[in-house]
Image (cartoon, rainbow, N blue to C red):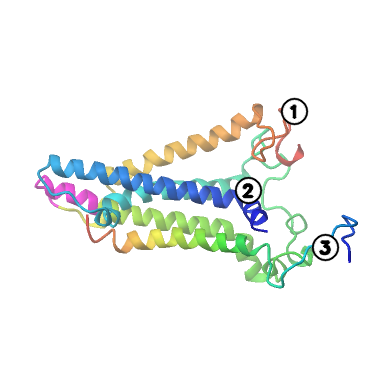
C-alpha cells in the first residue's frame, strides 16, 4: 500500500528486527557498564598499587 | 536507517566520544607527567598500562567522577523542592514537592504507554519513582569510595617517599588531602549549577532546551514558558 502521508511514494520496508529503541537501550547499558567498571576496577586494583 | 539511529542518539553518542577522547588525553598527559616526576626523583619510568592501573590515575579520574555524580544527584533532589523564579531549570512556583499521582501519572493514573513499574503501585512504583536519584546517588557514593581507596594509596606512597608512616583508610578519609581533593571538585560543580540556575533567568540560547524561548519574559519560571 502507498504511504498515506506521502501518496505515490512506496512504503518503507520495515525489517522484522528493526527497533529504533535498540540503540538507545544499548547506550543506556553502555554508560552504566562503563561507569560501574571504572568504579569497581579502581576500588579493587587502584587500592593495591601506586 | 543508520543515519536516523545516529540522529536520535546524538547526545549520548557525542558525549561518550568526548568522554573517551578526554580520558585518553588525560592518560597520555598524566603518564608523561608521572614519568617526568619519576625521573626527577631518580626512579624508573613506568609503562602506560602500569600507569592506567595506578592509584595516581585512578584518583585523578574518580575525584572528578564523584563530583559530577554528586552534582546531578543533588540537582535531581534539590529541584523537587527548591525553586528559582524565572529559571527554566526550576518548576513553576506553585509546583514544589513530589506532585500528585495524577501529575506524575503513577498507579491508576498511568496510561498504556507508561513504564510497567509506574503502573503496578506499591514498592515497585516507589522504587521506580526515585530510580534516577537512587542510581545517580549510588554512582556518586561508589566513585567517591573509589576516590578514597586510590587516594589513600597515592597519599601513602608520598608518605613513604618522605620517610613518614602510611595511614589506614579510616584516617585518610578524615585527612586534609582527601577533603582538599573532594572540595576542589565540589566547589566548581556547585558554582556551575548556581550559575546555570540564575544566568538562565536573563540569558537565552535559541533552540536549547536548557534555555527559555528567546522571547519568554524574565519572570516566567520553568514550564510556564
Q: Disc 1 on helix, strand or loop?
A: loop
> Is residue B159 one of those drawn in magenta?
yes
Question: Residue at label 2?
Answer: B80
Rendered location of residue B70, percent (x, y): 47, 48
Question: Residue at label 3?
Answer: A11
Residue at (60, 49) in percent of width and height: B10
User: Chief secondary structure of the magenta span?
Assistant: helix
Chain ID for label 2? B
Asked if one can make out residue B70 in the rendered structure from this viewpoint, the answer is no
Instruction: Please give the range of residues in magenta.
Output: B153-165
> Is residue A23 one of those drawn in magenta?
no
- Callouts 2 and 1 on one subunit: yes
Q: Disc 2 on helix, strand or loop?
A: helix
Residue at (65, 54) in percent of width and height: B3
Viewer-proximal residue, B161 or B85?
B161
Residue at (27, 50) in percent of width and height: B56
Q: Residues within 10 Å of mark 1 (few under 14, many from 20)?
A: few
Residues at circles 3 and 1 in contact by the CB criterion of under 8 Å: no
Residue at (53, 59) in percent of width and height: B134
Chain ID for label 3? A
Residue at mark 3 to residue at mark 1: CA–CA distance: 45 Å
Residue at mark 2 to residue at mark 3: CA–CA distance: 45 Å
Rendered location of residue B40, percent (x, y): 13, 39
Question: Residue at label 1?
Answer: B217
Rendered location of residue B28, percent (x, y): 32, 46
Amino acid at each position: 500500500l502507498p504511504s498515506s502521508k506521502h501518496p505515490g511514494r512506496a512504503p518503507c520496508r520495515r525489517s522484522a528486527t528493526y527497533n529504533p529503541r535498540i540503540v538507545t537501550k544499548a547506550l543506556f547499558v553502555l554508560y552504566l557498564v562503563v561507569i560501574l567498571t571504572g568504579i569497581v576496577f579502581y576500588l579493587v586494583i587502584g587500592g593495591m598499587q601506586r | 536507517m543508520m543515519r536516523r539511529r545516529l540522529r536520535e542518539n546524538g547526545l549520548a553518542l557525542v558525549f561518550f566520544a568526548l568522554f573517551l577522547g578526554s580520558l585518553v588525553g588525560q592518560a597520555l598527559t598524566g603518564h608523561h607527567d608521572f614519568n617526568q616526576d619519576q625521573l626527577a626523583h631518580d626512579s624508573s619510568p613506568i609503562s602506560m598500562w602500569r600507569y592506567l592501573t595506578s592509584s595516581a590515575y585512578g584518583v585523578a579520574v574518580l575525584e572528578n567522577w564523584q563530583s559530577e555524580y554528586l552534582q546531578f544527584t543533588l540537582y535531581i533532589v534539590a529541584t523537587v523542592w527548591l525553586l528559582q523564579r524565572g529559571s527554566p531549570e526550576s518548576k513553576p512556583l506553585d509546583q514544589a514537592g513530589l506532585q500528585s499521582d495524577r501529575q506524575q501519572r503513577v498507579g491508576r493514573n498511568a496510561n498504556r504507554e507508561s513504564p510497567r513499574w509506574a503502573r503496578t503501585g506499591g514498592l515497585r512504583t516507589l522504587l521506580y519513582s526515585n530510580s534516577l536519584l537512587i542510581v545517580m546517588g549510588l554512582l556518586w557514593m561508589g566513585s567517591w569510595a573509589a576516590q578514597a581507596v586510590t587516594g589513600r594509596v597515592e597519599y601513602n606512597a608520598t608518605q613513604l617517599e618522605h620517610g613518614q608512616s602510611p595511614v589506614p583508610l579510616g584516617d585518610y578519609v578524615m585527612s586534609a588531602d582527601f577533603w582538599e581533593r573532594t572540595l576542589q571538585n565540589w566547589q566548581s560543580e556547585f558554582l556551575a549549577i548556581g550559575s546555570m540556575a540564575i544566568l538562565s533567568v536573563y540569558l537565552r540560547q535559541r533552540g536549547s532546551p536548557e534555555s527559555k524561548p528567546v522571547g519568554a519574559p524574565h519572570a516566567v519560571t520553568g514550564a510556564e514558558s
